[in-house]
Amino acid sequence: MALRDTHVTLAHGGGGKAMRDLIASVFEPEGQEDQARLMDAALQEPGAKLAFTTDSFVVTPVEFPGGDIGKLAVCGTVNDLAVGGARPLWLSAAFIIEEGCEVALLRRIAKTMREEADRSGVRIVTGDTKVVGRGSADKVFVTTAGVGVIPPGRHLAADTIRPGDVALVNGVLGDHGAAILAARGDLALSTDLQSDCASLGHLMEAVLTAAPNARAARDATRGGLAAALNEMAQAAGVGVEIDEAALPLRPEVKGMCEILGLDPLYLANEGTLVLFVPPEEAEAALAAMRTRPEGRAAAIIGRASDQGPGRVTMRTAFGGRRIVDMLVGEQLPRIC
């Protein structure tokens, strides 16, 4: 029977008919079951490895320019698999829903997830729903897990980065964090910025075809580019120097950061990764990124070196150098 309720009640989490109607009307079209049986030809290749990841998403607001929490969940999980060299195949999705949440909102989120999964070439194969009382959540929280396959012979790991390797990003920096900040309306900021939320599986496949000796990649989510680079530098025991003039940043993001005293290097991204490749494959990797819509703003931003192992520095526009350290705390809460 079609769901007639407009808002979620505690009865929708009670295991009875109300819960059955909610799941059947909102989530079952996304293919959810209590468990999934997985089979793919890639699993049969000798030397292939499974990749598995999980993440939770608690963004405020749950709908924002460029996406919503559902798109964020699919992209975030797909990207965690892709930057490790895996081909994402299957996702699970679990929802913590607050009493009083609009059913229409849940329908929009579920629809967005299905559309993004289709674009990414993955299937949402299992899931779960829970309902909590008012004030125990913020409308809806989403937890996703993903499974992919790493083809034989492919190995991406930060500890393989060597001095001289080139660092690239596939797109502009800070759009997600800036768009979320503006969408909250707390600071009366007027901007057309949209989140960069995008799945990067197809982009990574194009890059790894063009640059098969790529060393490592990270998606620059919480903590932004600065956190991703520091993690990689420390894991590899190399220094990393980036060039401020080479960083792809929108004027709107620069302006917002200047007004609010924020650093765009630490703003979250949800469709941007940083990749290290051997110098002889840098141009091929850059060209491959630019063949994809999510890689049109790709740029070479720096290099690994044997100077200052574990440290990230930046050549500034004024000709000096500054240390780009890990962020202490968060510039913005609840951004993914």
Image: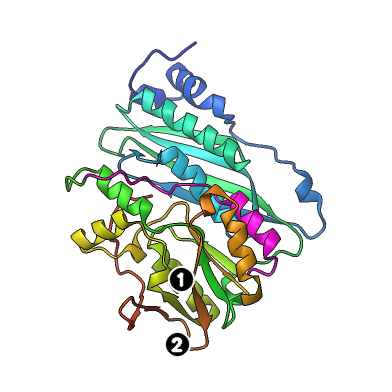
Rendering coords of residue 294 (x, y %): 52, 50
Residue 80, given in percent of the width and then of the height, sits at 54, 55
For this orientation, the residue located farthest to the top is 1
Q: Residue placed at 47% from the left, 44% from the top?
A: 73
In what element is the residue under mark 2?
A: loop
> Magenta stretch containing residue 69, yes or no?
no
Q: Is residue 128 above or below residue 325?
A: above
Rendered residue at 76%/49% (across/down): 42
Q: Nearer the viewer, residue 288 or 149?
A: 288
Instruction: Report the amino acid beneath label 1.
Output: Leu
Region in magenta: 190-215
Q: Nearer the viewer, residue 302 or 9?
A: 302
Which residue appears at 43% of the width and 49% of the height? Answer: 196
Magenta stretch, overall SS:
loop
| Residue 181, x across and y down, in percent | 27, 49
**Tally of marks:** 2
Which mark is drawn over residue 229?
1
Q: Which mark is residue 308?
A: 2
Of the pair 27 and 165, the residue shown nearer to us: 165
| Residue 84, horizontal then vertical, whole percent | 60, 60
Amino acid on which disc 2 is placed: Gly
Q: Is residue 195 magenta?
A: yes
